[in-house]
Image (tube, grey):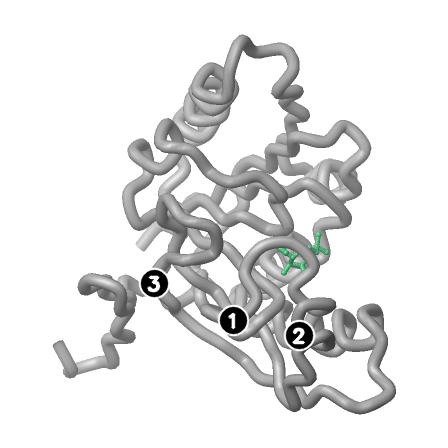
Amino acid sequence: MAPVSLGVLASGRGSNLQSIIDACRRGDIKAEVKVVISDRQDAYALKRAEKHGIDAYYINIKDYQDKAAYETKIVELLRRYNVQLVCLAGYMRLVGPTVLNAFPWRIMNIHPSLLPSFPGLHAQKQALDCGVKVSGCTVHFVDEGMDSGPIILQACVPVYDDDTEDSLAERILEQEHKIYPRAVGLFAEGKLIVRGKKVFIREAGND
Ligand code: GAR
């Protein structure tokens, strides 16, 4: 079976992109990153892609008359590379209907909290401010809401009294790099079934 073609949208440093590239290259998952797109010219994710010989594009939303036109360009690029699964990896924009409708239940996101707690920006700070004793990360399918789509995988980390936003973010990131490639791998193996708000992971012989 041919590897699943991935398109990654990223706004920043791209460490999650890197974890997916590495898992693909090691052969841990049957997938291949075909294209990386960023809304930020200075995103290190673009450099990572180039280093690995992956085509990378900066799309400036200001060059388009509205968000729909900007997203039409993104969809056109993703289709040009025959992308089957779109991975948001630190992509700091809400995905609009143009991209959502082009890839129904074919868009994943990683978020640095145990959703549905602490969606949106500064998830680690939100967790610290609430005094939670555990936090973590979530991979989910993207719907029209903010970090609200069906949950695929989660991982927990402890929260310590002396944690700062940075120390907690670092502990969570370590888990992000494990569960995001794992979720992509499950998708590539056809094991993810979305039913309403829930994602079921189909094991062999268990339909
Ligand atoms: C990650 O912690 C990711 O979970 C978070 O941004 C960081 C990106 O890091 N995403 C969000 O907060 C989205 N709501 P990276 O660029 O090194 O992958």
- The reply to whether residue 28 is visible in this rendering is no
Residue 3 lies left or right of residue 43; in this view the side is left
**Residue type at numbered disc 3:** Pro
**Residue type at numbered disc 1:** Ser
Q: CA distance from mark 1 to mark 3?
A: 14 Å
The image quarter in which residue 5 lies: top left
Callout 3: 10 Å neighbours few (<14), some, many (20+)?
Answer: many
Q: Which residue is mark 2?
A: 127
Work out whether mark 2 precedes mark 1 in sequence or the reverse, and give the earlier one.
Answer: 1
Callout 1: 10 Å neighbours few (<14), some, many (20+)?
Answer: few
Q: CA distance from mark 2 to mark 1?
A: 8 Å
Work out whether mark 2 precedes mark 3 in sequence or the reverse, and give the earlier one.
Answer: 2
Dot 1 lies on which element?
A: loop
**Where 157 sits versus 57, above or below?**
below
Dot 2 lies on which element?
A: helix
Report the disc number at residue 68: none
**Which quadrant of the render holds ligand 1?**
bottom right
Residue 34 lies left or right of residue 206; in this view the side is right
Q: Tell me whether circle 2 and circle 1 mark residues in contact (CB < 8 Å).
A: yes
In the picture, the quarter occupied by the C terminus is: bottom left
**Where 168 sits versus 108, above or below?**
below
User: Residue visible at 66% across and 78% down?
Assistant: 130
Residue in front for this viewpoint, 21 or 133: 133
Residue 189 lies left or right of residue 128; in this view the side is left
**Where 120 sits versus 94, above or below?**
below
**Residue type at numbered disc 2:** Ala
Report the disc number at residue 150: 3
User: Residue visible at 64% across and 85% down?
Assistant: 132
